[in-house]
Image: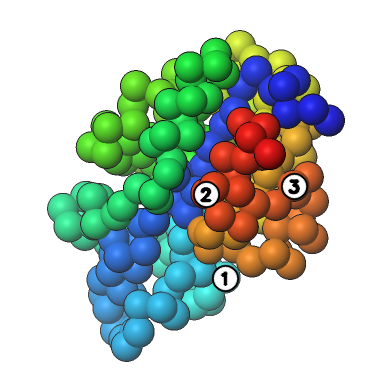
């Protein structure tokens, strides 16, 4: 399908617009230490970037749901004070967003991160002028499933999913798009590999930010 049919583009935040590794992994380490779990290398905590936190604590450390919810509270205790802006925008993202906006494309953020945190990050890095909506999960851990986040974003925008495109770096982004009958583009510069994204059903895969810009702006 021609890229011109997409009037609305939804972007994941972590691993797609910004590289949040330091802030997220340090926050996870802090939470795990509350359970007397020591992690020497922050690299081992990269799988936490992208998926809903509660699921990750349960999947990677076999926490019960109650333990996982407590761990999420500890995570946020550190994140809101130290980790929120321990983060950086990928080079080339602002320029791409500016050009898409200039072309009349409606842009929104759809993230599993709580909306209140996502809004602060987007504002802090000067990206808020490009996005019509910033939609995330709720602090009570509801609407953490990516398909629900995407559905809510489309509803807020009053957008038909057939004319919308999802951009993300993890399988949750691609699967969430498919559940909403949306096309998607996976990006490899974040935290999901080629196999993860292709097996999830990404329509196209961009290796770098310039590759993504080439796809979205048809600059080839």
The picture places residue 31, in percent across and down from the top left corner, at 30, 69
The residue located at (75%, 35%) in the rendering is 183
Residue bearing the label numbered 1: 59
The Cα atoms of the two marked residues, 3 and 2, are separated by 13 Å
The image quadrant that residue 132 belongs to is: top left
Q: Count of labels shown?
A: 3
Name the N-terminal-most of marks 3 and 2: 3
85, above or below 115, in the image: below
Residue 145 to residue 50: above or below: above
What's the CA distance linking mark 1 and mark 2? Answer: 30 Å
x, y (%) of residue 144?
52, 44
Q: Residues within 10 Å of mark 1 (few under 14, many from 20)?
A: few
Residue that label 3 marks: 204
The residue at 69%/64% (across/down) is: 194
Left/right of residue 61 with respect to residue 27 in the rendered view: right
Q: Decide: few, some or many residues near mark 3? Use Cα within 10 Å; few <14, some 14-19, many ≥20.
A: some
* Callout 1–callout 2 Cβ contact below 8 Å: no
Q: Is residue 79 left or right of residue 127?
A: left
- Which comes before the other along the chain, label 3 or label 1? 1
Q: Answer with the quarter of the image where residue 120 lies.
A: top left
Q: Quadrant of residue 130?
A: top left
- Neighbour tally class for label 2: few under 14, some 14-19, many 20 plus, Cα within 10 Å: many
- Front residue (pair 175, 32): 175
Q: Quadrant of the N terminus?
A: top right
Residue 79's x, y, as percent? 25, 55
Q: Is residue 159 visible?
A: yes
- Residue depicted at 64% across the width and 35% down the height: 219
Residue to which mark 2 is pinned? 209
In this picture, residue 207 sits left or right of residue 87 = right
Instruction: Residue 147: tell me if it is visible.
Output: no
Q: Residue at x 55, y 16 (%)?
A: 103
């Amino acid at each position: 399908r021609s890229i011109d049919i997409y009037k609305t583009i939804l972007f994941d935040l972590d691993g797609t617009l910004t590289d949040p590794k330091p802030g997220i992994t340090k926050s996870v380490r802090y939470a795990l230490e509350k359970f007397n779990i020591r992690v020497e290398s922050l690299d081992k905590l990269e799988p936490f970037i992208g998926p809903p936190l509660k699921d990750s604590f349960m999947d990677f450390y076999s926490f019960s749901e109650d333990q996982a919810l407590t761990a999420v509270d500890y995570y946020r205790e550190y994140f809101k004070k130290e980790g929120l802006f321990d983060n950086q925008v990928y080079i080339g993202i602002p320029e791409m967003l500016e050009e898409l906006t200039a072309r009349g494309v409606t842009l929104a953020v759809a993230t599993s991160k709580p909306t209140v945190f996502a809004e602060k990050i987007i504002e802090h890095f000067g990206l808020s002028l490009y996005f019509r909506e910033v939609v995330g999960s709720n602090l009570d851990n509801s609407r953490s499933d990516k398909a629900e986040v995407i559905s809510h974003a489309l509803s807020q925008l009053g957008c038909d999913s057939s004319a919308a495109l999802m951009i993300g770096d993890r399988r949750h982004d691609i699967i969430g798009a498919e559940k909403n009958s949306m096309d998607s583009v996976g990006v490899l510069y974040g935290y999901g590999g080629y196999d993860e994204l292709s097996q999830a059903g990404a329509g196209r895969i961009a290796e770098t930010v310039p590759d993504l810009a080439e796809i979205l702006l048809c600059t080839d």
